[in-house]
Image: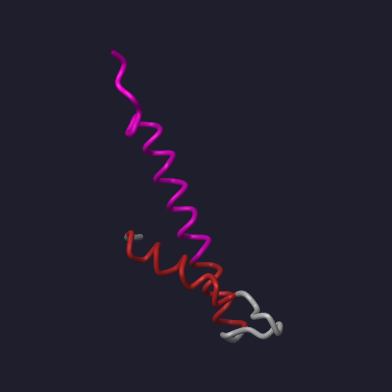
Amino acid sequence: MSDAEIEMYLLRARLSLPDENGRYQVPREGRKRNILNVGKAVAQLWHDLEEEERVGVGQKALA
């Protein structure tokens, strides 16, 4: 999943939440699809973080 796709899915997450009146902006099937894609995006982010930790990306060099 590309960075752009991850960003898009995370931004769409709010469409699956009810508004202040308890109404949804998209039908149930759309909300299910949005939530599934948000879950995949979060899982990808988690995987990327674990991979960075595994290979030592972002760690300070020892003097």
Horizontally, residue 26 falls left or right of residue 21, namely left
Q: Which colour scheme is used?
A: secondary structure
Q: Which image quarter: residue 51?
A: top left
Horizontally, residue 16 falls left or right of residue 47, namely right
The image position of residue 2, as x and y in percent, is 32, 60
Residue lying at the far front of the rendered structure: 20
Q: Which image quarter: residue 32?
A: bottom right
The image position of residue 60, as x and y in percent, is 33, 25
The image position of residue 10, as x and y in percent, is 47, 65
Residue drawn 64% across the image and 80% down it: 19
Residue drawn 33% across the image and 59% down it: 3
Which quadrant holds the N terminus?
Answer: bottom left
The image position of residue 31, as x and y in percent, is 58, 77
Magenta part of the protein: which range? 38-63
Horizontally, residue 20 falls left or right of residue 2, namely right
Horizontally, residue 35 falls left or right of residue 8, namely right
Which quadrant holds the C terminus?
Answer: top left
Helix, strand or loop: magenta stretch? helix
Seen in the picture, residue 36 relative to 52 is either above or below; the reply is below
Residue drawn 40% across the image and 69% down it: 8
Number of numbered labels in the structure image: 0
Is residue 39 part of the magenta span, yes or no? Answer: yes
Residue lying at the far right of the rendered structure: 22
